[in-house]
Amino acid sequence: MELDRDLQSIQEVRNLVARAKAAAAQLASFSQEQLNAICEAVAAACAREAEPLARMAVEETGFGRWEDKVLKNQLGSTIVWEHIKNARVVGILRDDPARKVIEIGVPMGVVAALIPSTNPTSTTMYKCLIALKSGNAIIVSPHPGAKRCILETFRIIEQAARRAGAPEGAVGCVELTTMEATNALLTHRDVSIILATGGEAMVRAAYSSGNPALGVGPGNGPSFIEKSADIPLAVQRIFASKTFDNGTICASEQSIVVERCSESAVAAACEAQGGYFLSDEESRRLASFLLRANGTMNPKIVGRTAQQIADMAGIRIPEGTRVLLSRQTEVSRTNPYSREKLCPVLAFYVAEDWEEACALSISILQNEGCGHTMTIHSTNQQIIREFALKKPVSRLLVNTPGALGGVGATTGLAPALTLGCGAVGGSATSDNIGPENLVNIRRVAWGLRELEDLRQGAPAPAPSPAQQAGPLSPQDIEAITRAVIAKLTASNA
C-alpha cells in the first residue's frame, strides 16, 4: 500500500534535519578558511550555470525575463561572494585588551530557508552562501511553483560544496513539497533559525513557528521625484527598476510621487520613455483585475510585461509600452494601485509641495510596505535628510533604481535577496541579511573590579582604541588570535 504523501514529506523533513544537525556539528569545527573554500566553490559553480538556471526559472514559473534573472543569479553568487569573502564571522572576531573581552562568532546550527517563486534560483544561491560562510547547515524549502529550478540549483550547490569538503547533509532540500512538510520544517526543534522570503502568510508562519526567524514583509515603496531632480534621468531609473525582471523584486518602486510644479514635466518624461497613462475607465478595469475578491493581488500579474497585463485586462495600449501608470489620489487597502504590485504597474500621485509629498509617502508605506524601502530623486540635501529622518523604512535609496539599489547592486548596501523590514515592518532586523546575521556572539570577559571596588565607585575601563577604530583587518585578527592563544596558554600553565 502506498504511503500517504503528506506523511512521506514529513518523514523526509525529519531525515533532512537529522543529517543537517550532524553536518552542522562538523561545520562548527571548520576554520573560516575552510568555510571560505566551500563558499568559493559554490559561488563559482552557480556562476557557471547562471544562464541555464535563469532560463529554467522563467520557463517553469512564467515570471520575469531570463536575461534579468541571469544578473540576479550573478548577484546571488559572484557579487554576494565578493562582498563577504574577506569577512570573518566565525572564530575569534575581536579582542579588547583594555576591557579584557573577547568576542567569538559561533554558528547557529541548522538554517531553514524558504525560497520564493519570484526569485527562486538566485535566492537559493544567496541563502546557501551566507549559511555556509557562517558555518551553518542549510535546508532549502522550495516554493511548489518553482520546485524544478530550485532543485536543480540545490544539486549544483550540494555537489560543489561536497567536492570542496563540506560534510554530507550540509546542504539539503525538501523534494516532497507539501504544507505539512513546510510546517514540519518550520517547527522542528532542531532548526536553529528560519530565513523566510516569500508571501506575507508564509513569513507570518515562520515568525509564529516557535523558532527564531528572519523574514521580510511586502514592499510598497513610493518614489518621490523632487523638483530639483534630473527628471528624465529619474524616470529612466524608475522605469529600469520597474521593468527589471518585470518588477519581481520587492524593493522595486510601486508609486511615483511628484510636486504639482513638476507634474507635467514628469508625465512627459514617463510618456517619452514608454509609459502609458491609463484613462479613468482603463484604471478601473485594470484595478478589478489586479485585486482579487479576498483582498490579495492576482498572481496572474506577477512578473508579466505591461503588454501581457493589458491584454489580460482587455485594455489596448500603444506598441512598445513598458510601464502602465494610473493617476491616483486615494491610499487604501482596497485600492490596488496604492499597494505592492510585482509587475510594471505604477500609481502616479501629485502633491502640492515636498512636505505634502513626505506625508503622502508615509501614508503609502503605512498602508503596506512599512519598514521596507523607498526611493527619492533629488539634489536637495536638506530634503533628502528630512525624508531620511521621517520615513518608516529600512532603506531610503537616493538617485538610484529601487530594485537594484535595495539589493545592493547599485548601492553600497550589502548584496542580499532577503531585506529585513525592522520592527516597524514586523521583522526581527532591518539589515540586508548576511552571514553575520547567522552567528551568535560568544563573549569571554575577564573580571576587572571586585565588589569592594564597586562600592568605592571605581570607574569602568574606557573603550580601547581597537574597539573605537571599527572592523579589524585579517592581519589584526591573526595577531589577536596569537595573543589570545598565548594568554590562555599562560593562564593554564
Image (cartoon, rainbow, N blue to C red):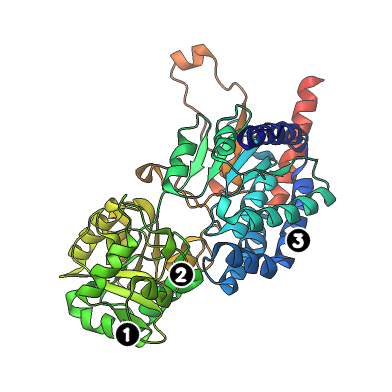
Residue 102, label in figure: none
Q: Look at mark 2 in the image and give the residue it sits on.
A: 304
Can the viewer see residue 141 in this picture?
yes
Query: The residue under label 2 is which amino acid type?
Result: Arg
The percent coordinates of residue 251 (x first, y second) are 43, 61
Q: Look at mark 3 in the image and give the residue it sits on.
A: 45
Instruction: Indicate the secondary structure of the residue bearing disc 2.
Output: loop
- The answer to the question of whether label 3 and label 2 lie on touching residues, with beta carbons closer than 8 A, is no
Mark 1 is surrounded, within 10 Å at the Cα level, by few (under 14), some (14 to 19) or many (20 or more) other residues, namely some
Name the N-terminal-most of marks 1 and 2: 1
In the displayed structure, does residue 463 sit left or right of residue 220? right
Q: Find residue 43 and report its image quarter.
A: bottom right
Q: Nearer the viewer, residue 107 or 118?
A: 118
Q: Is residue 444 above or below residue 164?
A: above
Residue 271, label in figure: 1
Q: Nearer the viewer, mark 3 or mark 2?
A: 2
Report the Cα–Cα distance between label 1 and label 2. Answer: 20 Å
Q: Quadrant of the N terminus?
A: top right
Q: Nearer the viewer, residue 200 or 476?
A: 200
Q: Is residue 102 above or below residue 468?
A: above
Residue at 60 percent across and 40 percent down: it is: 112
Mark 3 is surrounded, within 10 Å at the Cα level, by few (under 14), some (14 to 19) or many (20 or more) other residues, namely many
